[in-house]
Image (cartoon, helix red, strand yellow):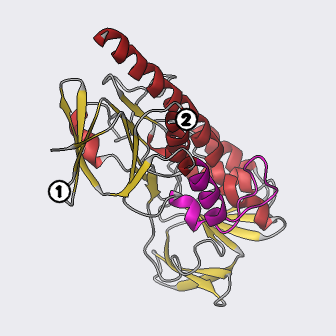
Amino acid sequence: MADKYDVIIIGAGPGGMTAGLYAARANLKILVLDRGPYGGQMNNTDAIDNYPGFSEIKGPELSQKMYDTMMKFEPDYKYGNVQSVELDGEDKLVKTDDGDEYRAPIVIIATGSDHKHLNVPGEEEYSGKGVSYCAVCDAAFFKDEDVAVIGGGDSAIEEGIYLSQLAKSVTVIHRRDQLRAQPTLQKRAFANKKMHFIWNAQTEEILGDDMKVTGVKYRDKETGAEKEIPVAGVFIYVGVLPQTEPFKDLGILDDHGWIVTDDHMETKVPGIFALGDVRQKDLRQIANAVGEGSVAGQAAYNYYQDLQDKKN
């Protein structure tokens, strides 16, 4: 028999924990499931300086504060790697890879997205110590420094332009001989005197001094020569993957795997909501994940009340 809840929240990042807080405060029976530590990608962020209320706070510290606030209202919290969500009448059946099953009329998906990695030496070692996947999050730490952006698509060029407002210089390292970004972005980038470009370059290694990033080693694909450039920061934009594999059979994904919702965070399947970085949207930040979490939590409560009204 599957354990029964009013709401099951899959994912305990900032958005998922906020949804849990709002739904639990409404006196619903809540289960929050996550395959890893609560906080999600915040745990990999050394310092956060763009979340309201804190001039700067460590990512793990903010994660703990959000978790403690949510747990005051006593939702169930369990570790579980969700494999599928199945529809069963008005209920949704959530199954994990451990064979556990949970049932609820409402599911909130907050599984986030993962940045594609280069998988080169130094990338993991210097993550949060000069290696970043978010210019909006970390640009302020590299004021008047030389930085590199790896990639050539829209995100890489948009973030490179953003970085140029603070950095001394921005060098775009791209494996092809031309950018893939839309023409208007390319025009802005090429006109930006702070931005420079290295073409046909395969990134080989992120260099550092055991404490922080000091440079990038790359191979010239035309000559085969290995070269290095000194930089204090490396921003990697080679793609983002939504974590939506367990939900592919629900018919709620777009062609690229993102979940589509309305303004109330509800998908086209009644009772299934989604929020945060797993949604089809442009800006992926802690602040808007929290906002979407509050919307989803309240919407879940309203949906639950409608179900009760129908039964009565």
Q: Helix or strand or loop: what does disc 2 sit on?
A: helix
If the image is split into quadrants, where does the C terminus sit?
Answer: top left
Name the residue located 48 percent from the left edge and 83 percent from the top edge: 121
Circles 2 and 1 in contact, beta carbons < 8 Å: no
Query: Looking at the picture, which amino acid does disc 2 mark?
Result: Arg
**In the drawing, what numbered circle is on residue 25?**
2
x and y, in percent, of residue 194 in the image: 78, 59
Camera-nearest label, 2 or 1 = 2
Residue 99: mark? 1
Say if residue 197 shows up in the picture. Answer: no
- The N terminus, quarter of image: top left
Residue 206, position as x, y percentages in the image: 56, 80
Q: Where residue 61 sits: x, y (%)?
A: 66, 64
Q: Is residue 310 left or right of residue 16?
A: left
Residue 204 image position (x, y, % from top left)? 48, 80
Q: Which residues are magenta?
A: 40-69
